[in-house]
Amino acid sequence: MELKDALSQRRSIRKFKETPIPREDIEGIIEAAIKAPSGKNLQPWHFIVISGKKKQELVELITQTAKKLQDKGIPTGSCLNSARAMGECPCLIFIYHTQGSYNKPPKGTDRYLWSVNIQSIGAAIQNMLLEATSRGIGSLWICDVFFADKEITEWLGRKDELVAAVALGYPGEAPGRAPRKNQEKVTEWIGEEEDCCN
Ligand SMILES: Cc1cc2nc3c(=O)[nH]c(=O)nc-3n(C[C@H](O)[C@H](O)[C@H](O)COP(=O)(O)O)c2cc1C
């Protein structure tokens, strides 16, 4: 598939078929992630592929954590919906920021490196979604995991920082294109146009 087709055909998929994904596709998707550029080429990412009973245990942990927050009157947005999608997809990938730590939140100029690393990981995740689309695999980028980030991180036995999860599976729905602000609205041009393009 051409890049322009992957870009326009990609959708956030929230309903998945049970059909498992071939391992070579999952490896291909992670391979695409690690081709992303990263600040100082630090490659500050770590991927955890989880499926089957272990995935269900983790989804249950996320669901129960969100419900506890709700019982305390804390809104959890789309977390339970995302947890349902995570339960449905055959393969879930957690992405960690290897230089991040909950015990040492970034302060001062460390915040810049933190931001650089998170941008690098964002690029890697976008590569994953595009590669999945090109292989006919649906995906969902999930930050609702933040509602249970400490719980997930402890369950996985990690010391670094959770950035997101990506759900993967064959699409069980075909959503239309979510609206976008048009280019004129989100772009401004400064300087002589003929100096940059013709
Ligand atoms: C950083 C990020 C976090 C997201 N987190 C969630 C999430 O937790 N749950 C969810 O259902 N969708 C999540 N999404 C998907 C967005 O809702 C979706 O990209 C947006 O509505 C546009 O739709 P599209 O992806 O089909 O173009 C996330 C997307 C991004 C980029």
Image (cartoon, grey):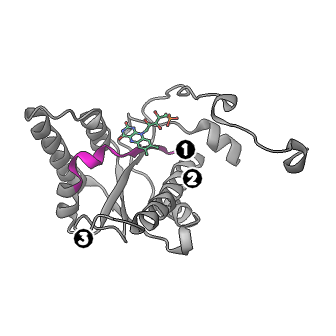
Residue 69 locus on image (x, y percent): 13, 39
The residue at the point 24 percent across, 64 percent down is: 102
Q: Quadrant of residue 95 in the image?
A: bottom left
Q: Are marks 1 and 3 in contact (CB under 8 Å)?
A: no
Which residue is under mark 3? 159
Residue 127 locus on image (x, y percent): 55, 55
The residue at the point 87 percent across, 46 percent down is: 197
Disc 3 residue type (three-letter): Lys
Element assignment for label 1: loop
Element assignment for label 3: loop
Q: Quadrant of residue 160 in the image?
A: bottom left
The residue at the point 40 percent across, 63 percent down is: 111
- Mark 2 C-beta closer than 8 Å to ligand 1: no
The residue at the point 42 percent across, 68 percent down is: 109
| Magenta segment boundaries in residue numbering | 136-149
Q: Mark 2 Cα within 10 Å, few/some/many (few <14, many 20+)?
A: many
Residue 131's tag is: 2
- Mark 3 C-beta closer than 8 Å to ligand 1: no
Which residue is under mark 1? 136
Q: Quadrant of residue 4 in the image?
A: top right
Sequence-wise, the earlier of marks 2 and 3 is 2
**Image quadrant in which the C terminus is located:** top right
Residue 1 visible in rendering: no
Can you say whether 182 is above or below 168 in the image?
above
- Closer to the camera: disc 2 or disc 3? 3
Q: Mark 3 Cα within 10 Å, few/some/many (few <14, many 20+)?
A: some
Residue at mark 2 to residue at mark 3: CA–CA distance: 29 Å
Can you say whether 122 is above or below 78 in the image?
below
Front-lying residue, 184 or 108? 108
Front-lying residue, 118 or 4? 118
Residue 154 locus on image (x, y percent): 17, 63
Disc 1 residue type (three-letter): Gly
